[in-house]
Each structure stands twice: as structure tokens, then as C-alpha cells.
Image: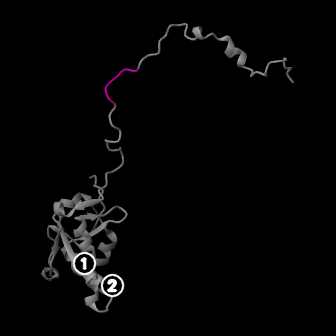
Amino acid sequence: MAQRRKGRMAELPFASLMRSRKPGKARQRGDAPSAAPVAGPQPDLFAAPLPGIAHALTYLDTVAIGLTRVDVRHLRAGEGADAYLYHVTTQADLETIQARGTIVFSPRAPLVLTERPGVPPWLANMMEIMESDDPAGHIADMPVVLRVKRFVIDELLEHDPDRTRRYGVSFFLLTGIARSE
């Protein structure tokens, strides 16, 4: 063990080297610290999009995209696709959409859309799912058909292979992520 001197505390092994330096001799070379050149204000790093991350929309304004309700009686079987995409929903969901003024969607909960020939099979499927009780008590569950011009949202669509295979008509998912072609 190291001997201790009386009246002094034990020192660290490098403490004597630290004490031997004099404060004035720390910079003998006369080198001043180089100042960083001022190039103007720093750009906002959060304003620019991140590389490799696609911007995703989460809602669309119903007036801006021209979302309108379609009378089901005017849809006929056997008609071909037109310039619109259609969405079948319930009366309660339509009232929610009208109250908000927006359609809300995300990549995890996309909005399903189809071409005109896909509306009758989609309606038939919804009617099978609905309860067969008194229809007057289920007005909120009644199906409603909405349409939007295809060119307005075409870049935000992805093909839905499962529903396309099931119904034999093209179905799409509105995910909000712009395609990069």
C-alpha cells in the first residue's frame, strides 16, 4: 500500500501532472480557435420532406373532390366503366361524412372504391349482410352510393386484388400515398 503523508489526502495518480500545468501556458502556439464561417440562417430541417418517406394524405375535402350521392335506381347492370369511381357505404356513415365535410382514410384503413360495374355486386353483398328485421328501424344501415371523378384521386389509388378477384370487377383502395411511376 502507498504511504500517506500526514495532513494530506490521498491523490489520484495523474493529479500531480494536472497541477504542474500553468494556466497561461495552455496555448503557447498562439493558435486562436477558428471561428465557424457564418453562412446565413440554418434551413428549417422539418420543412423539407424526408428522403425515402412518401407523404400520405389522411383526408380529402368532399367539396374539393366533387363527392356526390348517386341514386341507386339509375345504376343498371351491364353498363361499362365510366369516368367515376364509386363507394358504397351506409346512411349513418354518409351523415358522418357530410357533418365533417371530409373523407377520412389511411394506409391501414383505406377507402374502398370500384368502377360502375362493381356497384351492383357490392350492394348485393351489403344487403345480404344487413339484418332481415324490420327495415324501417334500420334506416341508418341502408346502403348509399357515392361517386367521385377518377382523375381527381387516380394517383392516390392502389389496386385491391382480393375484391377484384371476388367480384370480377376492378376495385381500388384509396390509401393516400401517391404512387411513384
The residue under label 2 is which amino acid type? Answer: Ile
Q: Which residue is drawn at the image coordinates 25% and 65% (left, top)?
A: 100
Expressed as whole percent of the image width and height from the top left, the position of residue 160 reads 31, 68
Toward which corner of the image does residue 101 lie, by quadrant?
bottom left
Q: Which residue is mark 1?
A: 91
State the extent of the magenta-drawn residues as a range: 36-41
Quarter of the image for the N terminus: give it: top right
Q: Which residue is mark 2?
A: 129
Report, in whole angstroms, how far the alpha carbon at label 1 lies from the one at label 2. Answer: 15 Å
Say which mark, if any, is on residue 41: none
User: Few, some or many C-alpha atoms within 10 Å of disc 2 (few <14, some 14-19, many ≥20)?
Assistant: few
Residue 29 in sight from this viewpoint: yes
Magenta stretch contains residue 70:
no
| Residue situated in front as seen by the camera: 144 or 126 | 144
Toward which corner of the image does residue 8 lie, by quadrant?
top right
Color style of the picture: one colour
Magenta: predominant secondary structure element? loop
| Residue situated in front as seen by the camera: 159 or 111 | 111
